[in-house]
Amino acid sequence: MIETFLRFIRLGVPLALLVSLQPGTSYAGSCPEDCSEPPPPAVDIYKHTAAGHLSPVTTRALPRVYVPNRSSNSVSVIDTLTLKEVDRFSVGSKPQHVVPSWDLKTLWVANNGTGKNGSLTPIDPMTAKPGQQIPVDDPYNLYFMPDGSAAIVVDEAMKQLDFRDPHTMVLKSSLPTPTCPGINHADFSADGSYAIFTCEYGDGGLAKIDLKDQKVLGHLDLSRMGMPQDIRLSPDGKVFYVADMMNDGVFLVDGDSFREIGFIPTGIGTHGFVVSRDGKRLYVSNRGSHKMEQGKANGPGSVTVIDFATRAVVAQWPIPGGGSPDMGNVSADGRQLWLSGRFDSEVYMIDTTSGAVTKIRVGVEPHGLTVWPQPGRYSQGHTGNMR
């Protein structure tokens, strides 16, 4: 070996090259075993919304449930400890949802009215009292850009999204969505680059929106014509769950490729979603009716529990005596699931361990209630889509 080494030196071969050719030697930048890239960290979009993750901004907020009573033009306030209605105040015309602001400092009541007489009523969660309402065209629902740069008012009547200042609600720009009649509910991709909105009317379907450039990326017709309602992203950020009130179940949609990949039957009038506080399960409210308005009281409403990991139904909770569970959220500790009873002028507090139901009377036609405070760094809108 030494003689060979000296012979190559006499022939003028550089020493560095000879060293690099020696067998069994490994140096920085070489891959003697495995040069593959390390796997990316697992995605869990709900990791900051678990119990115990309350933001300092919400520490002095009163523990309350805020219920918009659509046909009473009011908001009922329920104490989550006594399970009693402790206040009821008037708001604008046809309040639909109570929406936590992106910065968690304000709760907005979305009063969509009848077109041009819509408004947003702010509530101070520290006092549970309303402030001066702001005129806003047709705010059926309200979301926020993932970075908090704008509020997104879902202008259902005009088939458009209005991007507004998140504090003053001054209009910044509008995005027409002509292929999405009844644009309705939304959720956001894990990286915040796009959102998918449900299209309630016409042939139904979904609209995919580029948030950076504020443009429509495409429309997806589902395999069965229906009436899509709420939508929620899976913890791993891969699959959007879409409630369909006419098909009595949940469509599964791959968000990146924007294609339907499955369906889960749940119950009559599948309507709303709430993610469990540990991020492992999806509570699905089945309103017990296919009617949008004036459904019968004491209908066959129920709640279906889906396991995110297996996409299997793991529990079915009927409302005792009948009911019409609609929209809501879970308590900060995850032990209570709160849902409005749309056609029964009541709210349901459901024990998430046993499925036991407590009913509380409120105003007429309660809709998108929120529970406050909730864990999370910021709100993306609706009744508390927290991240």
Image: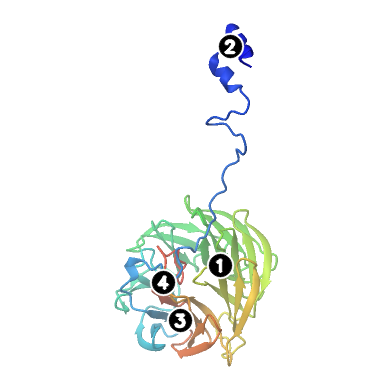
Q: Which of the two marks, 2 or 1, is nearer to us in this view?
A: 2
Amino acid carrying label 2: it is Val
Q: Gap in Å between the C-alphas at discs 2 and 1?
A: 68 Å
Q: Which of the two marks, 3 or 2, is nearer to us in this view?
A: 2
Q: Earlier in the sequence, mark 4 or mark 1?
A: 1
Q: Nearer the viewer, residue 10 or 321?
A: 10
Amino acid carrying label 1: it is Ile
Residue 374, disc = 4
Q: Gap in Å between the C-alphas at discs 1 and 3?
A: 21 Å
Q: Gap in Å between the C-alphas at discs 4 and 2?
A: 70 Å
Q: Gap in Å between the C-alphas at discs 3 and 4?
A: 23 Å
Q: Earlier in the sequence, mark 3 or mark 2?
A: 2
| Quarter of image, res 65 | bottom left
Up the image or down, 156 lies above or below 219; here it is: below
Q: Nearer the viewer, residue 214 or 256?
A: 256
Tag 4–tag 2 contact (CB < 8 Å): no
| Residue labelled with disc 3 | 70
Residue 13, disc = 2
Q: Residues within 10 Å of mark 2 (few under 14, many from 20)?
A: few
One can see residue 289 in this view: no
Q: Residue 101's x, y, as percent?
A: 38, 67
| Residue labelled with disc 1 | 231
Q: Which of the two marks, 1 or 3, is nearer to us in this view?
A: 1
Q: Earlier in the sequence, mark 2 or mark 1?
A: 2
> Looking at the image, which residue is at 61% across and 39% down?
34
| Quarter of image, res 272 | bottom right
Q: Quadrant of the N terminus?
A: top right
